[in-house]
Image (spheres, helix red, strand yellow):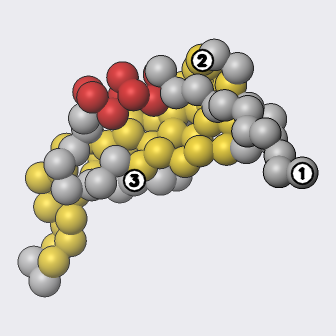
Amino acid sequence: MTTAGRFRPVPVERFEGEGWRGMKAVVTCGFSNENGFHAAGGECLTAVLSDGRRAVLVDSDHLHGRDPGLEHAVAGLRFTEQEQER
């Protein structure tokens, strides 16, 4: 369960791609101003992925809500090996 986002905790989903594993959750997001919280953002994606040495944190911008393009990009993420300088 995650405590990120507004309101109640939501389930975390485990998922994996080419050479990595991760966890993601869809949380309620929006913005706050002098009038309080506004759920205009709808749902946002929060995810963390790791290949065991490096990690990536993904958090949608909380202004435009859940973005299917971002979810597609996360699913296709690849960690690449870099040659060390000698």
Front in this rendered view, residue 66 or 2: 66
Please, which residue is most extreme toward the right here?
86
How far is mark 1 from mark 2, CA to CA?
Answer: 31 Å
- Which disc, if any, is residue 86? 1
Whether pointer 2 and pointer 3 mark residues with C-beta atoms closer than 8 Å, the reply is no
Q: Position of residue 49 (x, y in %)?
A: 62, 36
Classed neighbour count for the residue bearing mark 1: other residues with Cα under 10 Å, few (<14), some (14–19), many (≥20): few
Determine the image quadrant of residue 31: bottom left
Classed neighbour count for the residue bearing mark 3: other residues with Cα under 10 Å, few (<14), some (14–19), many (≥20): some
SS for tag 3?
loop
Residue at numbered disc 2: 17
SS for tag 2?
strand
How far is mark 3 from mark 1, CA to CA?
Answer: 45 Å
Q: Please indicate, yes or no, whether residue 2 appears anywhere in the rendered image.
A: no
Q: Position of residue 65 (x, y in %)?
A: 22, 44
Q: Is residue 1 above or below residue 3?
A: above
SS for tag 1?
loop
**Residue plotted at (66% across, 31% down):** 80
**Residue plotted at (25% across, 38% down):** 66
Camera-side mark, 3 or 1: 1
Residue at numbered disc 3: 5
Q: Amino acid at mark 2?
A: Gly
- Quick check: 33 left or right of 69? left
